[in-house]
Amino acid sequence: MLLTRTDKPYFLMCLVFSQVLFILLLYRRGTSSVFHGLFGAYSAWDYSKTHDVYTNLSVFIPDPEAVRSLYCPVSSPILVGPITITFNKTPSLKKIQLKNRYVKPGGYFSPRHCYGRYRTAVIIPYRNRESHLRTLLYYLHPFLQRQQLHYAIFVVHQAGNATFNRAKLLNIGVREALRYDDWDCLILHDVDLVPENDYNLYICDENCPKHMSSAMDKFQYSLPYWAYFGGVSALTPDQFMKMNGFPNTYWGWGGEDDDIAMRIRLAGLSITRTPLILGRYKMIPHDRDTGNEENSYRYGLLKNTRRNWRDDGMNSLAFRLLSRDSAPLYTNITVDIGEAPPPPTQASKWLVF
């Protein structure tokens, strides 16, 4: 039946609305999440049935007669899916070392029976969170070993008592990590987030920066808002440099994640997300740190991202390296990043060009 003149505008309006809704859904969950949801992929995960995080690591017992001549399979055959995570007792460093005896000093690991296809650097901004760091290391090392990655863990420690600056520490971590190896992927990882499923591969999307922690228990396993890019993310070195890294000007809690999401788009890139059923993370319970108070000036900074992103980032990074040490489970990089500048005046606080 032909549409009447009265029906046609209504039909077009419905069509436009449905297209806008679909685009928003893609942006919220990422294209991979939508299509996996439509076709039922990952629907079999049952998070009430979990596995010990150290399952299957006997595969990595060294065999002196084995010849490592082949690349590891694209999909590791020893993944287990959902893992058991508890925060009842913080493991000791000695226990973690004993359970990860083939991790080399500096937090390096390579599969012993094949060549790792992917070279991944995990970078963790850090200060005064020793129990959180030990918990993360306890879970993360076997998690990555089962994925058969060549990887290393870098902990960037902000010295002193100045206001915490997460994004600047991540910039420093990227610069330092690239001194050690030619990494395929940079995983930027908060110290208080533990991944729940080892099929959440710690590798990069070659085309888009990837938001990995798309479903945190803190947010009832959903995305808090469309532009969210906090927690755990994966970028190739080229992607990171194309967007000039992260901003150095966000001191304290809040704002830098939204700035990062904006500069991804300004650099001509787009965000992809791990599907919600797979990108699940548990947050280690904690109170807000002293020295990481809420950044009340973040909204003013965000208004100027479009103007400042090319000048505020890796090309303006300034810090003082205090030490670079190979600890048994990670490479520790201790830095002095200075102090937060004086609060902006009311006149300049909301300056936009």
Image (spheres, grey):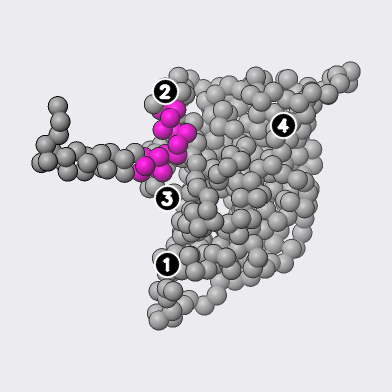
Label 2 – label 4 distance at C-alpha: 28 Å
Mark 4 — residue? 117
Label 1 – label 3 distance at C-alpha: 15 Å
- Asked if residue 193 can be seen in this view, the reply is no
Mark 2 — residue? 39
Mark with earlier residue (3, 4): 4
Residue 52 falls in image quadrant = top right
Residue 185 falls in image quadrant = top right
Mark 3 — residue? 227
Where in the figure is residue 270, as x and y percent of width and height? 50, 47
Image height check: is 74 above or below 92? above
Where in the figure is residue 114, as x and y percent of width and height? 78, 25
Q: Nearer the viewer, mark 2 or mark 4?
A: 2
Packing grade of label 3 (10 A; few <14, some 14-19, many >=20) is some
Q: Which mark is residue 303?
A: 1
Packing grade of label 1 (10 A; few <14, some 14-19, many >=20) is some
Mark with earlier residue (2, 1): 2
Mark with earlier residue (2, 3): 2
**Main SS, magenta residues:** helix
Where in the figure is residue 94, as x and y percent of width and height? 72, 37
Label 3 – label 4 distance at C-alpha: 31 Å
Mark with earlier residue (2, 4): 2
